[in-house]
C-alpha cells in the first residue's frame, strides 16, 4: 500500500525563462546517473539505425525496400521426360533447359544444383555433425547409422550436351556442378542445353529425407513423394553472384522462376499428382475418374472423390506391367515435385479466390483415414483463403496436400504432410492438430518461398518464419470456420505464434541460441530459431507494436512487391517501415540480430509531494549555478516521500488531499484553474528492464475503486536509459496495484517482477521448471 502524503505549496514571483528551461535537464541527468553508470551507454545502440547491417540501396533494390529500376532475375525453363521404375526404385530423367540471362553480366559458366548428391554414400554431409552418441534415436536411424552400409542415392550424370548434341565440359563439386560454356552467355541471351541422369530412390521413412518412398509391407506397395530429383540451375543475382553454397541438408533452396513441361512415366495403375496442370487427364484417367475430375472443377461446397478408398484398395493389388505418361505444365514456378502410387485416394474441390477458381486437392493412402478424408482438403481451403487475404490472391491453378509419413515439405502447388491415425483408425488430438497444422504450414509455403521467392539456403527465417506467422493466423481462422474440429477448446491450439510459447526458448542457455539472422546450417534448435521466434516476433509486431491495420498493410505491401521475385531480409525490413511510418530498426536489431530476451518489471512506487522547501539536491544545484530561490520563476518543488528532507519534515500517514491548497497557489500566480482539475495523488513509478530487448511498456494501473487503466508507453521510453525509467501518474484515485504486460503479449521471460505490490506467484517459467521436477 502507499502511504498518504503532504502537498505544500510555494510561491516565487521572479521570472527567469532561461533557468527554467535548462534547469530540469541538468537535474534529470544527475538523478538518472546511477542507473546509467552501471551499464555504460548501451542504450544508444538499441535505437541506432541499421545502416551498417543492411546492404547499401542501389538500382536493383531501393532504400524503400522495393525492387529497383534495374531489378532483374534469371529465367530457367525445363522440358523433362522422367521415368519412375517402381520395381527397382530408380528414377531416370532427361531434361532440356533454356537459360535466359536477364542480368547485365556475361556468364562464362553455369552452376547446377545436384541435391541428390547429399545421398552419395561418401557424401561429406554424412559426417557434418560432431555431437557424438545421441541419447535417444529413432530405431530406423540407429540401424541405418551404425549397422548399414550407407545408401547410394547420388546423381549419375550420363551426359551434359548443348543444343547441337555436343558434350559440354562439366565439373562436379559435391552438390554443385559447373557447366563451362563454349562462349559466354551475353546479357539478354538464351542458352539451351540438356542433361541425362538417373539415381536410386531412397526410403524416406528410414532416412528422414524430403524425397523418396514409403514402403507398405502389408500390400507390398510404395508411395513415392519425389523432389530435388533433377539437376536444377542455381540462382545468379545482384546479391550473391552465383548462389552456389553447397547443400548440407538444413539450408534449403535458392531457385529460379521458370516454366515447366514434365512428362512422368509411371506404372499404368499409379495415380500421380504434381506441380502444374495435368495436360492429358482423358488419357491417364478412366472414364469414371475423368467424369468426376470434371465435376470437381465446379464443386465449391465439398470435395469430389476422383478415386475412392474402395477403388484405391483394389488398385493396390493390381501391379500393372504397363506404363502411362502423365503430362504436367506449370508457369512461373521455382521448382517441381510429384507424388505417385497405386495406393492413393484422390479428392478435390474448387475454391473461389478473387476472380479465379483454384483446386484444393488431397492425395493419401488408406492408412491416412479417417483423418485425411475429414480434414485435409478443409485445411487446404482455409490456408488459401487466409493467406490470400493477407498477401495476394493465390495465383496458381491448384494446391495439393499429399500424405507422406513423417514428412512436412513444400513445393510449388504440392506438398507432403504427416499425421496418421493408429491402425484401428483412432487418433489423438495431438495427431489431429499436428496434421491440420502441418498442412496449413506446407500449403502456406506456396506464398513464402514459392511465390515470394527468398533465398532459403542463406535465410531460413524468410520463408519459415513468415510462413509460421501466417500459419498461426490461418489456424485461428480454421478454428472459427470449423468449430466442430476444435470442440471443447476455446480456440485452435496453435503450437507456435503465441508470445508465451517462445519464452522457454528465449530464456534458455545462450550457448544454444543464435540470432534469427543466422545461416540454418549453423544453429542449434533450428525450429525455434527459424520458425517459432520470427513468427512470434511478427505476431508481437502486429498485435502490440504496430497494430493490425499498419502491420497488415505493410506486410501485404511486402508480399505484393516481391511476388514472383527474390527478396532479401533488407527488402522486408525496409518495406515494413516504408509502408507504415513506424521506425522498427530497434525491433529488427533486437529480435533478429541478437539473442536478447524481454524482461521488463515494475521496481517501485513513490508518491511525491509539492513542497515549499527545495530538497538538498536542488539547493546544491542552484549553488552550482550561482543562483538562489529568488532567481527562479514561479516553480513547484516536488519531493518524493523517500527523500531525506521529506522524511525529516513530514510524517508518513498524514492526510492526502491538498488539491485545494494547490489550487489557491495556482490562482495566486495567475495560472487559471478553470479548465484543470487538480488531482489528489502524485505518483512516480520506477520500471526496470533486466532483459536486453527494448519493448513498448504496457501497464495496467489498478485503483482503489476497482477500476483498471491500461497505459501503453512507447518503446522510445528506453532511448536514454536502457536499464530503468520512471513515469509520473497524477490521479484523484489511489493506485493499489500495477502490472506490466498484463496480457503477456511481449514474451516477457520473468513475470516475478511484473507486479506491484509484488505477488508471490511463480513465473510461468518457474512453474514449468517446478512441474518438470514433479
Ligand atoms: Zn516450413
Image (spheres, helix red, strand yellow):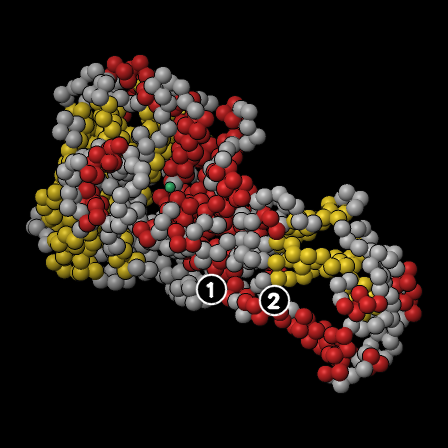
Which residue is drawn at the image coordinates 34% and 19% (left, top)? 423
The answer to whether residue 612 is seen in the rendering is yes
> How far apart are the alpha carbons under marks 2 and 1?
26 Å
Name, please, the residue furthest toward the left.
Answer: 166
**Residue 50, label in figure:** 1
Q: Specify the quadrant of the image occupied by residue 269.
A: top left
- Report the front residue among 343 and 146: 146
Pick whichever of labels 2 and 1 is earlier in the sequence.
2
Please determine whether, in this image, residue 21 is positioned above or below residue 271.
below
Residue 333: x and y in percent read: 31, 43
Residue 770: x and y in percent read: 52, 40
Label 1 CB, ligand 1: below 8 Å? no
Under circle 1, the secondary element is: loop
**Image position of 174 (left or right of 399):** left
For ligand 1, which image quadrant applies? Answer: top left
User: Pointer 2: what residue?
Assistant: 35
Label 2 CB, ligand 1: below 8 Å? no
The answer to whether residue 567 is seen in the rendering is no
Name, please, the residue furthest toward the bottom.
Answer: 626
Residue 336: x and y in percent read: 27, 39
- Report the front residue among 79 and 486: 486
**Residue 496, label in figure:** none
Which residue is drawn at the image coordinates 53% and 49% (left, top)? 749
Q: Specify the quadrant of the image occupied by residue 642.
A: bottom right
- Report the front residue among 259 and 747: 747
Which residue is drawn at the image coordinates 39% and 51% (left, top)? 512
Q: Nearer the viewer, mark 2 or mark 1?
A: 2
Which residue is drawn at the image coordinates 37% and 28% (left, top)? 419
Q: How many marks?
A: 2
**Image position of 143 (left or right of 602):** left
Amino acid at each position: 500500500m502507499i502511504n498518504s502524503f503532504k502537498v505544500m505549496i510555494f510561491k516565487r514571483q521572479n521570472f527567469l525563462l532561461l533557468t527554467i528551461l535548462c534547469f530540469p535537464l541538468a537535474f534529470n541527468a544527475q538523478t538518472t546517473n546511477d542507473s546509467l553508470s552501471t551499464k555504460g551507454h548501451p542504450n544508444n545502440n538499441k535505437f541506432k539505425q541499421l545502416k551498417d547491417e543492411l546492404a547499401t540501396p542501389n538500382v536493383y533494390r531501393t532504400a524503400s525496400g522495393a525492387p529497383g529500376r534495374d531489378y532483374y532475375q534469371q529465367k530457367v525453363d525445363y522440358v523433362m521426360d522422367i521415368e519412375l521404375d517402381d520395381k527397382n526404385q530408380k528414377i531416370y530423367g532427361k531434361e532440356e533447359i533454356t537459360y535466359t540471362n536477364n542480368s547485365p553480366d556475361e556468364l562464362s559458366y553455369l552452376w547446377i544444383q545436384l541435391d541428390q548428391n547429399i545421398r552419395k554414400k561418401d557424401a561429406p554431409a554424412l559426417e557434418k555433425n560432431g555431437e557424438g552418441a545421441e541419447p535417444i534415436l529413432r530405431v530406423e536411424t540407429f540401424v541405418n547409422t551404425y549397422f548399414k552400409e550407407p545408401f547410394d542415392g547420388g546423381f549419375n550424370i550420363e551426359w551434359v550436351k548443348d543444343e547441337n548434341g555436343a558434350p559440354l565440359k562439366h565439373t562436379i563439386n559435391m552438390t554443385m556442378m559447373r557447366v563451362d560454356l563454349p562462349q559466354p552467355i551475353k546479357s539478354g541471351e538464351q542458352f539451351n542445353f540438356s542433361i541425362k541422369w538417373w539415381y536410386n530412390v531412397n526410403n524416406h521413412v528410414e532416412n528422414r529425407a524430403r524425397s523418396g518412398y514409403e514402403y507398405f509391407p502389408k500390400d507390398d506397395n510404395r508411395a513415392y513423394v519425389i523432389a530435388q530429383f533433377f539437376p536444377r540451375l542455381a540462382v545468379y543475382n545482384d546479391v550473391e553472384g552465383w548462389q552456389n553454397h553447397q547443400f548440407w541438408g538444413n539450408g534449403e533452396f535458392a531457385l529460379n522462376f521458370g516454366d515447366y513441361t514434365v512428362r512422368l512415366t509411371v506404372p499404368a495403375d499409379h495415380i500421380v499428382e504434381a506441380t502444374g496442370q495435368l495436360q492429358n487427364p482423358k488419357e491417364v484417367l478412366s472414364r469414371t475418374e475423368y467424369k468426376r475430375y470434371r465435376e470437381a472443377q465446379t464443386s465449391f461446397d465439398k470435395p469430389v472423390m476422383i478415386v475412392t478408398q474402395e477403388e484405391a484398395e483394389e488398385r493396390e493389388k493390381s501391379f500393372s506391367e504397363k506404363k502411362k505418361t502423365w503430362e504436367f505444365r506449370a508457369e512461373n514456378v521455382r521448382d517441381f515435385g510429384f507424388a505417385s502410387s497405386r495406393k492413393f485416394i484422390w479428392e478435390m474441390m474448387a475454391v473461389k479466390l478473387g476472380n479465379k477458381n483454384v483446386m484444393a486437392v488431397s492425395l493419401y493412402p488408406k492408412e491416412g483415414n479417417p483423418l485425411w478424408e475429414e480434414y485435409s482438403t478443409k485445411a487446404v481451403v482455409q490456408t488459401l483463403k487466409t493467406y490470400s487475404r493477407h498477401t495476394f490472391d493465390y495465383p496458381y491453378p491448384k494446391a495439393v496436400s499429399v500424405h507422406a509419413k513423417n514428412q512436412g515439405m513444400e513445393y510449388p502447388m504440392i506438398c507432403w504432410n504427416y499425421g496418421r491415425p493408429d491402425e484401428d483408425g483412432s487418433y489423438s488430438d495431438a495427431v489431429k492438430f499436428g496434421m491440420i497444422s502441418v498442412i496449413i504450414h506446407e500449403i502456406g509455403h506456396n506464398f513464402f518461398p514459392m511465390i515470394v521467392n527468398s533465398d532459403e539456403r542463406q535465410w531460413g527465417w524468410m520463408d519459415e518464419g513468415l510462413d509460421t506467422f501466417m500459419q498461426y493466423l490461418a489456424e485461428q481462422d480454421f478454428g472459427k470456420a470449423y468449430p466442430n474440429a476444435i470442440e471443447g477448446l476455446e480456440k485452435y491450439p496453435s503450437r507456435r505464434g503465441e508470445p508465451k510459447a517462445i519464452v522457454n526458448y528465449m530464456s534458455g542457455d545462450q550457448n544454444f541460441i543464435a540470432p534469427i539472422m543466422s545461416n540454418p546450417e549453423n544453429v542449434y534448435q533450428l525450429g525455434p530459431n527459424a520458425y517459432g521466434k520470427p513468427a512470434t516476433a511478427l505476431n508481437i509486431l502486429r498485435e502490440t507494436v504496430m497494430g493490425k491495420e499498419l502491420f497488415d498493410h505493410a506486410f501485404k505491401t511486402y508480399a505484393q512487391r516481391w511476388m514472383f521475385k527474390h527478396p532479401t531480409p533488407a527488402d522486408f525490413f525496409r518495406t515494413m517501415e516504408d509502408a507504415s511510418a513506424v521506425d522498427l530498426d530497434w525491433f529488427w536489431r533486437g529480435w533478429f540480430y541478437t539473442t536478447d530476451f524481454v524482461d521488463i518489471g515494475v521496481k517501485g512506487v513513490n508518491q511525491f509531494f509539492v513542497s515549499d522547501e527545495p530538497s538538498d539536491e536542488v539547493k546544491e544545484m542552484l549553488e552550482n549555478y550561482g543562483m538562489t530561490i529568488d532567481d527562479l520563476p514561479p516553480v513547484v518543488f516536488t519531493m518524493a516521500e523517500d527523500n531525506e528532507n521529506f522524511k525529516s519534515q513530514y510524517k508518513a500517514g498524514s492526510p492526502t488531499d491538498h488539491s485545494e491548497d494547490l489550487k489557491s497557489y495556482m490562482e495566486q500566480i495567475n495560472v487559471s484553474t478553470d479548465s484543470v482539475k487538480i488531482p489528489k495523488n502524485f505518483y512516480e513509478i520506477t520500471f526496470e528492464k533486466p532483459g536486453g530487448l527494448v519493448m513498448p511498456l504496457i501497464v495496467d494501473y489498478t485503483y482503489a475503486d476497482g477500476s483498471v487503466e491500461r497505459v501503453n508507453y512507447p518503446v522510445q521510453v528506453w532511448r536514454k536509459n536502457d536499464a530503468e525509467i520512471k513515469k509520473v501518474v497524477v490521479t484523484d484515485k489511489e493506485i493499489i496495484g500495477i502490472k506490466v504486460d498484463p496480457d503477456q503479449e511481449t514474451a516477457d521471460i520473468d513475470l516475478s517482477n511484473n507486479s506491484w505490490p509484488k505477488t508471490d506467484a511463480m513465473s510461468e517459467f518457474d512453474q514449468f521448471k517446478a512441474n518438470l521436477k514433479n
